[in-house]
Amino acid sequence: SQTIHQWPATLVQPVGSPLSLECTVEGTSNPNLYWYRQAAGRGLQLLFYSIGIDQISSEVPQNLSASRPQDRQFILSSKKLLLSDSGFYLCALDRGQGTEAFFGQGTRLTVV
Amino acid sequence: AQSVTQLDSHVSVSEGTPVLLRCNYSSSYSPSLFWYVQHPNKGLQLLLKYTSAATLVKGINGFEAEFKKSETSFHLTKPSAHMSDAAEYFCASNQGGKLIFGQGTELSVKP
C-alpha cells in the first residue's frame, strides 16, 4: 500500500529565510500529488497539484513554488518566507478521479 | 468550476445523540465525493467515498453519507456520537482530476 513521508514534522523559520519541504511517496507509481495548506480555523487550501514529473499547476498566487523532479518526490519551496506562510502543510496523493486521497502527517510551519 | 461548501463551521452534540454534518457541492456532472476526518496535528483519514454506485455510502466508525443529486448534497451522519468522534471533518470533491475540500466542520462531543 502507498505511504507518504513528509518532513520535518515541525519547523520554525524567521521571516525572509528560504523554505524547502519534501514529500516522498512509496508503494505506487505515477500518482497525482498535492500540496495543501491549512491555516488556523480555516479549511484546506489547495496550493499545487501535479499529474507527473515537472507538471505543476499552481492554484493561488503566492510566495511559494513547487517542483516534482522525480515521480515520487514533490517539493514545496520559498525563497523568502512571510509571516502569512505559517500554517500546517499537507502532502497528498491520489490515483485519479474517483480514487481516495492519502495524506502525509503534515508539517507545522511557524514563521517568526 | 467545482466547489464544496460545508454549511457549519462548528457542530456540538452530546454523547449518544445523532451527528449531522452538512456538505453541498457544485459541479457540472456527477463528481466523486469524500468525507475525511482529521485529528489535531495529524493528516486526514478517509471516512467514506461516493463514486456513482449506491447513493447511501457506509464508512468507518459507524458513519454514513447519502448522495442526493437533486439537492447537490452529501451530508455525513452517525446515529450515536462517541467522545472519540470529536475532530475536524472535511467534505471533498474530485472532478477533473483535482481534489477540492470544503472549509471543514469541527465536531465537539459533550459527555
Image (cartoon, coloured by chain):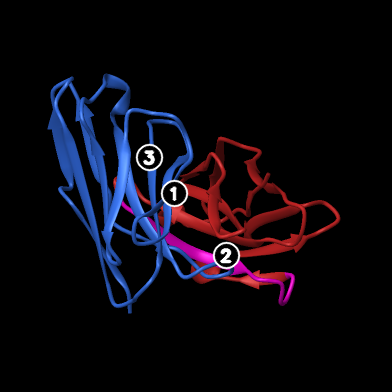
Please determine whether, in this image, residue A10 is positioned above or below residue A51.
above
Q: Which residue is mark 2?
A: B63
Residue B58: percent from left, percent from top:
61, 72
Q: Quadrant of residue A81?
A: top left
Q: Is residue B23 above or below residue A32?
A: above
Q: Residue at x 28, y 69 (%)?
A: A3
Identify the mark nearer the N-term, 1 or 2.
2
Count the marks: how many? 3
Residue B86 numbered tag? 1
Q: Which mark is residue A37?
A: 3
Q: Colour of chain A?
A: blue
Q: Residues within 10 Å of mark 3 (few under 14, many from 20)?
A: many
x and y percent of residue A101 in the render? 45, 63
Residues drawn in magenta: B42-55
Q: Could you confirm whether marks 3 and 2 are on the same chain? A: no
Chain B visual colour? red
